[in-house]
Amino acid sequence: MRTLEDPSSLVLASASPRRRDLLSQLGMRFTVAAADIDESPFSAEVADAYVLRLARTKAQTVAGRFPGAWVLAADTTVALGSQLLGKPSGPEEARDMLTRLSGRKHSVYTGVAVAGRAEVSAVVHTSVTFRTLSAGEIDWYVSTGEPLDKAGAYGMQGKGSFLVSAIEGSPTNVIGLPLGETLELLTRAGVPLPWRAA
């Protein structure tokens, strides 16, 4: 059985450097072990159900490899109305997504799940409004390459911050891991937090 002081007692089931950095900012010690699952949405699956299903599946998949550990997983998607905007397949799709988001409000959903020693989960929603973007701004942003590995084709924590005119809700949710809500889940699951260490 792992001890609580062992960093492998908490496992982050994600290869995302953004999630790793956010969790590290809290002083958490953890091991990274990405889950390799099919992330295709089901037919007519809505955004909140989609991200919750993926987060739970990721957490449970990795928990099977780390008996006795807590496993934290998350999944984020962008929704424009009922349409899910995942990671673009290339520059053209990124350009199309950004054009559609220009001047409009959209939703960012993140499912967060803990599995292993305890199982808890939640979905966090944030509303984001984009500035009205020129074709030149979109082309420049796509040329940086930043949109290509991000849901909705933008990263608010990077160069894409200039796209956003307003946000309602958790900023870290848009980056990929809503810290306040994640801490609540970790607390409910019994994960030892740095400021509560004996």
Image (cartoon, helix red, strand yellow):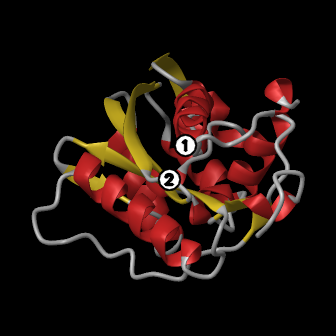
Question: Could you classify mark 2 by the number of other residues whose Cα lies within 10 Å: few (under 14), some (14-19), or many (20 or more)?
Answer: some
Question: Could you classify mark 1 by the number of other residues whose Cα lies within 10 Å: few (under 14), some (14-19), or many (20 or more)?
Answer: some
Which kind of residue does numbered mark 2 sit on?
A: Ala
Q: Position of residue 178 (x, y in %)?
A: 56, 34
**Quadrant in which the C terminus is drawn:** top right
Q: Position of residue 2 (x, y in %)?
A: 80, 66
**Quadrant in which the N terminus is drawn:** bottom right
Q: Residue 198 versus residue 29: which sits nearer the camera?
A: 198
Do labels 1 and 2 touch, CB within 8 Å?
yes
**Which quadrant of the structure image shows residue 155?**
top right
On the picture, is 38 further left or further right than 186? Answer: left
For residue 118, the mark is: 2
Q: Residue 79 versus residue 28: which sits nearer the camera?
A: 28
For residue 189, the mark is: 1
Q: Is residue 166 above or below residue 146?
A: above
Q: Position of residue 32 (x, y in %)?
A: 75, 67
Instruction: Give the mark, 1 or 2, whose residue is nearer the N terminus.
Output: 2
Which kind of residue does numbered mark 1 sit on?
A: Ala
